Image: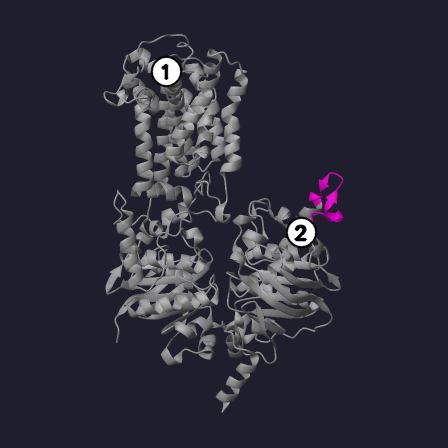
């Protein structure tokens, strides 16, 4: 039996209005990759932020490598050998890899000897099978390489317990594979690796042990053979979602959005969308499943017109909008709920009324001879607040002060106000609590029943299976297959997401039945 | 023009350029840590007047220089409190500092306009070095403050590029959040660098009144603080290039008078324009984008207030 390196006992942490962690126990062992699994808002990150010294628990104790510890800052946690890698990297872009790793490290003397530092860091990297050019600038590196710099930074600080928050969210599948190889190597060397994730595919792939959380509580532990889609799904999904289970199917009618042979380049010129075709009908939700970074973002942005395409055709109803401006698409009935509500969705420093106006300020009804019809806007703001249950303290305050769930409601209030015929919703519930999540899905279903076509991008397979009428599986920018709700099963979709064609999936399933 | 005249002109160029050099070195350090200070002109004037008054009163050059540096540092400290602690807009605060410094220096110095002093920085020939042909008389037969500025070029370059303090300063200006996460006290670094910038601007002011013009009059710097700010961009935030730029601008500054002396008459207004024209050209052609990336050396987080809890 390996020794436990991290033991958390009865951790409780409350935030105003939310019980983020309630009496959670957690144990991780030396040399294992431990997945902390749960839906968004299940309390995984809170628990790990406590372990990394960012938050302090209200109750409960932490035992690291046999010693009872109290952390007052991340520096304390680093001293105890715990390193956390956040979703947003903390790296200086204009510095080299070596400079980033050495920055703030206590062994870095006043007179910096670049050669010695590079040599020390290279030694640590080689011992853990991390390949990096020490003299490269961070801005020259891919996201995957930047992540390796973060890992190296932690290892150079002697981290023996490494926590990674959603490490594959920004990686391509190839980069993810590589990351997992590195993590396996590190685990073999005696590190304890904890991965916070909500992706089942990953968990089944790499984890030696899984702790599942649900609504702030421990919901189950699985290890070795016990780790499977079925067992984990059961532990992960919240009771109420399983209970109210079935969503009535939509009534698909005429095509409202047609995408033909679409090719789009992504970040750094990668072929993100690689010959994609599909049709979205009125009255249906077409779910898009896929491991993050398989072209979802580029697809959504190309359809909504904010990203240029290489070739292909986009039809909104009968109109060819391939070369149309964003505004022309809006006027033809397209709504877009972007992936990043704060960056692309809203203007943080503007108030509610101004944000609601962003996609319709040119409409005659919003204008008077002297400019924006603010009296009418005030009414619309009140309507939106009531209809979308937006919790707002001061209507005149900048929207950036609102919580994530409320921000997303503002985006939806704006997008749905024009009764769109096509709604592109990219990860609309990411980071939202259960209540807001339910409301957003209810709104999308209502729009579907009104006759809109919804293209729903999500990383949450359970939600996709529940709400979509059909599921399109995206793999490396291509359609791996489109599955009807009736035939869709989580295992099938998961395999297709990993690049297995529907035919191969059928064969595998046929074999496994006998 | 014969050789002696050219050497004399280049010597004058070094003297004229030293005001720019001291001030822009300070601004480089401040900006490297992420704090843009457009108050150089104001800090310079306050340093100029306080240094001059201290010289008149104390008859000590050391006291005068120290007073000018402290005054400049205090001015920068106002900027630091506003921008680092209170997270005010750095452009607005810097402009306010310049206007404030211009007014304050005129008020404080009104009784000293036209007052003469013998407590001045005189040229000190460095034994040996000043005997080197051409370079000797140009660089090594100057006032003490010129030598100080030359040493500062080396020292600042060394600290920024070769020490862990430099690493911390540069990273504070590039990405304060990452710097904070690495356990560096970003606020201390920014305060220190900002005040250091003011100290050097104050010293540049003392150079004007006690080593170059040898007199105090209202608004004696006449926009030289602004040129120092522009020089930082010209120098791409590098001390060595700041030296070259300062002397180049110094040369342009004295050229009008010198050319008139040899009978070539070009309107002085045209020459007064040149430094700014040069700055504009540098801005247009100097900010290349090799590899699709800005490579002008500007700190990425320059003038962006850092708030740990910002969302």
* In magenta segment, residue B241: no
Whether residue A62 is visible to the viewer of this picture, yes or no, is no
B287 shown above or below A228:
above
Q: Secondary structure at mark 2?
A: loop
Q: Position of residue B160 (x, y in %)?
A: 33, 39
Mark 2 closeness class: few <14, some 14–19, many ≥20 residues within 10 Å: some
Q: Tag 2, which chain?
A: A
Q: What colour scheme was applied to this rendering of the protein? A: one colour
Front residue of this view, candidates B291 and A405: B291
Label 2 in the same subunit as label 1: no
* Magenta residue span: A358-375
Q: Is residue A4 left or right of residue A146?
A: left
Q: Tag 1, which chain?
A: B
Residue placed farthest to the front in the image? B2
For disc 2, the marked residue is A359
Mark 1 closeness class: few <14, some 14–19, many ≥20 residues within 10 Å: few
């Amino acid at each position: 039996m390996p020794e436990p390196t991290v033991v958390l006992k009865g951790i409780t942490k409350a935030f105003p209005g939310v019980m983020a962690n309630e009496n959670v126990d957690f144990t991780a062992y030396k040399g294992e990759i431990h997945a902390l699994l749960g839906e968004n808002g299940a309390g995984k990150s809170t628990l790990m932020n406590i372990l990394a010294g960012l938050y302090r628990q209200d109750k409960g104790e932490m035992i690291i490598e046999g010693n009872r510890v109290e952390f007052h800052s991340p520096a304390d946690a680093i001293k105890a050998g715990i390193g956390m890698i956040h979703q947003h990297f903390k790296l200086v872009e204009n510095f080299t890899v070596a400079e980033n790793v050495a920055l703030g490290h206590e062994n870095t003397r006043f007179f910096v000897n670049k050669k010695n530092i590079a040599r020390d860091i290279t030694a640590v990297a080689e011992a853990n099978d991390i390949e990096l050019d020490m003299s490269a600038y961070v801005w020259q590196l891919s996201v995957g390489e930047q992540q390796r710099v973060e890992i190296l930074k932690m290892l150079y600080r002697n981290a023996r317990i490494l926590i990674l928050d959603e490490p594959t969210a920004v990686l391509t599948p190839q980069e993810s594979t590589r990351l997992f190889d590195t993590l396996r190597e590190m685990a073999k060397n005696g590190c304890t690796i904890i991965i916070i994730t909500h992706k089942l595919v990953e968990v089944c792939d790499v984890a030696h042990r899984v702790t599942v959380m649900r609504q702030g509580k421990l919901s189950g532990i699985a290890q070795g053979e016990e780790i499977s889609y079925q067992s984990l799904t059961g532990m992960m999904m919240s009771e109420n979602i399983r209970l109210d289970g079935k969503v009535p199917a939509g009534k698909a009618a005429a095509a409202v959005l047609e995408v033909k042979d679409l090719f789009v380049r992504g970040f750094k010129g990668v072929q993100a969308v690689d010959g994609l075709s599909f049709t979205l009908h009125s009255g249906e939700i077409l779910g898009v499943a896929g491991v993050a970074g398989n072209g979802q973002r580029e697809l959504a942005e190309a359809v909504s017109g904010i990203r240029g395409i290489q070739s292909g055709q986009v039809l909104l109803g009968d109109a060819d909008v391939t070369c149309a401006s964003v505004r022309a698409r809006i006027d033809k009935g397209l709504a877009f709920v972007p992936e990043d509500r704060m960056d692309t969705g809203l203007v943080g420093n503007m108030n509610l009324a101004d944000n609601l106006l962003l996609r319709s300020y040119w409409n005659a009804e919003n204008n008077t001879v002297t400019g924006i019809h603010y009296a009418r806007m005030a009414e619309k703001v009140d309507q939106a607040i009531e209809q979308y249950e937006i919790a707002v303290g001061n209507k005149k305050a900048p929207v950036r002060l609102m919580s994530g769930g409320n921000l997303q409601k503002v985006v939806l209030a704006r997008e749905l106000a024009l009764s769109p015929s096509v709604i592109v919703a990219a990860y609309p519930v990411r980071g939202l609590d259960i209540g807001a999540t339910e409301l957003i899905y209810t709104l999308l279903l209502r729009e579907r029943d009104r006759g809109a076509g919804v293209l729903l991008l999500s990383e949450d397979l359970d939600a996709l299976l529940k709400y979509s009428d059909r599921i399109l599986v995206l793999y490396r920018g291509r359609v791996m297959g489109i599955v009807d709700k009736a035939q869709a099963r989580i295992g099938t979709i998961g395999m297709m997401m990993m690049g297995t064609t529907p035919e191969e999936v059928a064969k595998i399933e046929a074999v496994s039945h006998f | 023009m014969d050789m002696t005249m050219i050497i004399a002109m280049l010597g004058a160029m070094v003297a004229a350029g030293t005001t720019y050099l001291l001030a822009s070195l300070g601004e480089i350090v401040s900006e490297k840590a992420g704090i843009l200070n457009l108050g150089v002109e104001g800090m310079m004037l306050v340093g100029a007047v306080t240094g001059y008054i201290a010289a008149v009163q104390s008859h000590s050059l050391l006291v005068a220089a120290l007073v000018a540096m402290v005054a400049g540092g205090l001015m920068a400290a106002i900027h630091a409190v506003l921008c680092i602690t209170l997270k005010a807009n750095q452009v607005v605060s810097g402009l306010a500092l310049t206007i404030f410094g211009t007014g304050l220096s005129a008020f404080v110095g009104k009784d000293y306009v036209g007052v003469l002093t013998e407590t001045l920085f005189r040229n000190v020939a460095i034994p040996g070095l000043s005997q080197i042909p051409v370079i000797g008389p140009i660089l090594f037969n100057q006032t003490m403050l010129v030598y100080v500025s030359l040493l500062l070029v080396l020292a600042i370059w060394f600290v920024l590029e070769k020490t862990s303090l430099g690493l911390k300063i540069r990273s504070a200006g590039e990405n304060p959040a990452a710097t904070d996460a690495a356990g560096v006290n970003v606020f201390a670094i920014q305060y220190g660098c900002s005040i250091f910038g003011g100290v050097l601007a104050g010293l540049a002011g003392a150079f004007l009144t006690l080593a170059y013009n040898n007199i105090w009059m209202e608004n004696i710097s006449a926009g030289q603080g602004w040129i120092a700010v522009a020089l930082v961009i010209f120098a791409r935030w590098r001390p060595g290039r700041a030296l070259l730029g300062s002397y180049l601008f110094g040369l342009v500054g004295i050229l009008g008078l010198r050319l008139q002396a040899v009978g070539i008459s070009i309107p002085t207004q045209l020459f007064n324009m040149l430094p700014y024209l040069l700055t504009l050209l540098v801005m247009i052609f100097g900010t290349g984008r090799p590899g699709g990336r800005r490579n002008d050396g500007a700190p990425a987080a320059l003038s962006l207030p850092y708030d740990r809890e910002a969302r």
